[in-house]
Amino acid sequence: TSTVLAAGLVAFSMRIPVAHVEAGLRSFDLDHPFPEEGNRQLVSRITKWHFAPTEQSKQNLLQEHIPAKDITVTGNTVVDAVYLGRALIHQDATELNYLKQHQLNFSEKDRVVLITAHRRENFGEGIMNICNAVEHIATKFKDVHFVWPVHLNPAVHDVVHVKFSDHPQIHLVKPLDYPSLLAVIDKAEFILTDSGGLQEESPSFHKPVLILRGTTERPEVVEVGAGILVGTDQEKIIQESEKLLTDAEHYRKMAEAPNPFGDGKASLRILDQIALDE
């Protein structure tokens, strides 16, 4: 989002029309997520084409007095990428190859949970609470393996590696390329994350997501029942994770929730609208 704002300001100064993909995402809290919330609000003031992923995003823009004629609800381009990527990793056992590249050789009996944590507002006590919750779950469920692509920021990397460098169920890997990430999502039972994008990718794979944040600019994933906000509350992370691991009906309801972020055709709608206006 910092790149979006910088490019938008340059384009605006040069009188080049700005098209904002994923417009209208709002938490209405400038500190969460930081700096994304501020960047998104600022770039909306200089945008010509607002491509909102959902109806809620459109309503957010309308409340900020963006003219309705400048807003197009498209779905999210992340879903386009996921659908394409999912088809590719399912070809010729490619998914298995991506997992093996990272020495993730799970048996059929192993259950996998993907975890990512990188938000600066979770540094310190927050990341420690997440680590303690993961340790508790791994101790209780010996068949559950965590794949953790560890962010390179020392505030995350050093803490996580000191805690789990030799843990047999917690696999610390370098940041994954996109096909490998999709392969892990596809293998996973559910996702623990403070990422924004993974809140959209998880329901695209029909995988429940526990959101390691107190607020989200993607409330649709919670509203449809595909995600739950757990923050960095250690007990809540444990409680909701255990429920997904033991309650089949609860898991089914979350996994079968409709994808609120579109049908994989957002890019076509964006191109059509720009071509129409041109």
Image (cartoon, rainbow, N blue to C red):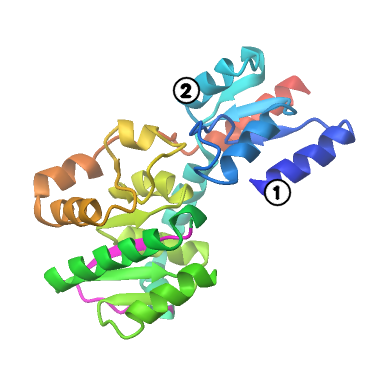
In the image: residue 16, left or right of residue 104: right
In percent of width and height, residue 185 lies at: 36, 59
Residue 14 inside the magenta-drawn segment: no
What is the magenta range?
102-118
* Residue at the image point whose x is 36% and y is 83% from the top: 165
In percent of width and height, residue 190 lies at: 27, 55
In percent of width and height, residue 150 lies at: 45, 70
Task: Check disc 1: other Cα within 10 Å, few if <14, some if 14-19, many if 20+.
Answer: few
In the image: residue 200, left or right of residue 68: left
Q: What predominant SS class does the magenta segment belong to?
A: loop
Q: Quarter-wise, where is residue 104 in the image?
A: bottom left
Residue at the right extreme of this rendering: 14
Q: Is residue 39 visible?
A: yes
232 over 42 or under it: above or below: below
Q: Is residue 97 visible?
A: no
* Residue at the image point whose x is 42% and y is 52% from the top: 194
Marks 2 and 1: which is nearer the front?
Answer: 1
- What quarter of the picture does the N terminus occupy? top right
Question: Which dot marks residue 55?
Answer: 2
* Residue at the image point whose x is 36% and y is 72% from the top: 96
User: Which of marks 1 and 2 precedes in the sequence?
Assistant: 1
Q: Which residue is mark 1?
A: 3
64 over 261 or under it: above or below: above
275 over 148 or under it: above or below: above
**Amino acid residing under circle 1:** Thr
Marks 2 and 1, how far apart at CA: 25 Å
Question: Which dot marks residue 271?
Answer: none
Task: Assign a secondary structure to mark 1.
Answer: helix
